[in-house]
Amino acid sequence: AQSVSQHNHHVILSEAASLELGCNYSYGGTVNLFWYVQYPGQHLQLLLKYFSGDPLVKGIKGFEAEFIKSKFSFNLRKPSVQWSDTAEYFCAVNPQNSGYALNFGKGTSLLVTP
Amino acid sequence: DTGVSQNPRHKITKRGQNVTFRCDPISEHNRLYWYRQTLGQGPEFLTYFQNEAQLEKSRLLSDRFSAERPKGSFSTLEIQRTEQGDSAMYLCASGTGTGGQGPNQPQHFGDGTRLSIL
């Protein structure tokens, strides 16, 4: 079955550590890719998106993600995390020409300790 | 804040009852989506409207579920004869888009309605 996989379900980091969250998908063809974040008690917010062009995309709050087509991956990175980055992170994929739905991974819960 | 608004925030009901949720999208957004999220999972797509037309429905949307967007503005999601398995967070999202396929623009999510079935 087609799916979106986030390999790390729970991540704990100290402030200033580097972050990389993995996301792989199994859809063929061209895809639109997204990372959403949900801070405690808040709604899902868009961090960054990739539709086409430069595979390294920059988002808000210092986050970036790299699309590697050959690996069907769209990993999220941040060089130095802050306590305020504690949140749930979701990768989402929309296969182009395949409807309007976003297909989400199960999410990664990130806890940043002081 | 002119984000996506969902009401009610919480709904507790007995099994077998009907429930209705409302979503008010961002005013200029022509696209509206419903998702369902259970604990430990990412949101799962239920249905999509472009203006007042319901263009896509997931297989998750059983015949007990119905969604409407009568004037292309707010939307309602009704669940009839609720079951324990319907307990979840129901999320609404809106966005803009041109063309026939794909979310050309990102989806903006509301805070959700949490449904608990007793």
Image: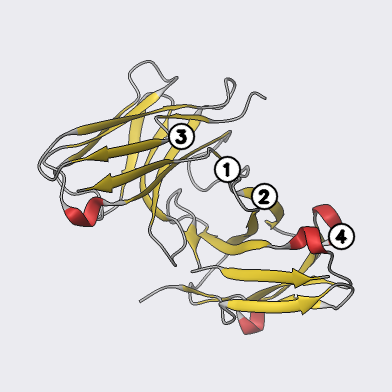
Q: Are marks 2 and 3 in contact (CB under 8 Å)?
A: no
Residue beneath the point at 52% across and 57% down: A96
Residue corresponding to mark 4? A62
Q: Tag count in the figure?
A: 4
Mark 2 on the same chain as mark 1: no
Residue corresponding to mark 2? A46
Task: Please report, as a chain letter, where disc 2 is located.
Answer: A
Cα distance between the residues tagged 4 and 2: 13 Å
Cα distance between the residues tagged 2 and 1: 8 Å
Q: Secondary structure at mark 4?
A: helix
Closer-to-camera residue (A106/A112): A112
Q: Nearer the viewer, mark 2 or mark 3?
A: 2
Residue corresponding to mark 1? B107
Q: Secondary structure at mark 3?
A: strand
Mark 1 on the same chain as mark 4: no
Tag of residue B32: 3
Q: Are marks 1 and 4 in contact (CB under 8 Å)?
A: no
Task: Please report, as a chain letter, where disc 3 is located.
Answer: B
Cα distance between the residues tagged 3 and 1: 9 Å
Residue beneath the point at 84% across and 55% down: A61
Q: Position of residue A102 (x, y in %)?
A: 49, 55
